[in-house]
Amino acid sequence: MDRSSTLTTSSRSAVVAWSPAAAWDLVASGESGPQWYVDAAPFVVRGAIDRFLGGAGRRHRPPGRARLAAGDRVGFWHVVEADHRHRRLLLEAEVRAPGRVTLEAGVTAADDTSVISLTIAIEPRGVLGAAYLIADLPARGAVAELTMLHLLTLIRRRDNPWPVDSVVEA
């Protein structure tokens, strides 16, 4: 898994032994039931914290169709963009935060494999947002790491032609 961070972003990417179309179907899935963008432990905890602090910490269910679309609300996320052609998904958190928090997911082709990437970003607002940006930096890295590991676990569990080596360590 590749890792990178800046002051405002934490990113993870991994090569998977799936076609880009198959990887995208999992990443952008809007099917009913558990989904990585709702059920990853960091998002469950963040939703609970938001509710504890008086926020909505919503638990919107996936829409029950093959793929997410712009305007959907899932978990505590609002789907800002679902570009199926370019395999890019942009979600914005609907939680109490001093600024805008986004999760961007994408899938790109890499020979006979795919690269799945996740980026969590914050655009702070005001002095409180600047303080939050600094204080949240270690947590943001942990959230990106745990979310990617959750997504990779789902890939490993799926029935695919490479059950043992479906995730290639880079």
Image (cartoon, rainbow, N blue to C red):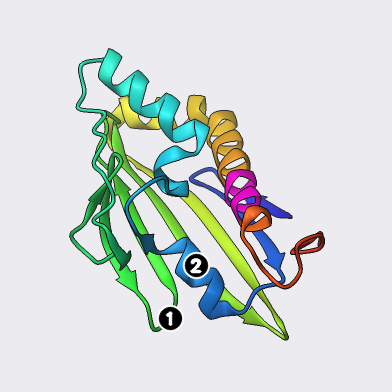
Q: Residue at x 53, y 36 (%)?
A: 140
Is residue 16 highlighted in magenta? Answer: no
Q: Residue at x 51, y 32 (%)?
A: 41
Mark 1 and 2 residues: CB-CB less than 8 Å, in contact?
A: yes
Q: Position of residue 129 (x, y in %)?
A: 34, 31
For the residue pair 67 and 139, the one nearer the viewer reads as 67
- Cα distance in 3D space between marks 1 and 2: 8 Å
> What is the magenta range?
148-154
Residue 23 relative to residue 128: left or right: right
Up the image or down, 46 lies above or below 70; here it is above
Task: Give the secondary structure at mark 1.
Answer: loop
Instruction: Indicate the quadrant where residue 115 lies.
Output: bottom right
Up the image or down, 126 lies above or below 45; here it is below
The residue that disc 1 covers is 86
Q: What residue type is disc 1 on?
A: His
Q: What residue type is disc 2 on?
A: Gly
Q: Residue at x 65, y 48 (%)?
A: 153
The residue that disc 2 covers is 106
Q: Residues within 10 Å of mark 2 (few under 14, many from 20)?
A: many
Q: Is residue 11 visible?
A: yes
Q: Residue at x 59, y 44 (%)?
A: 150
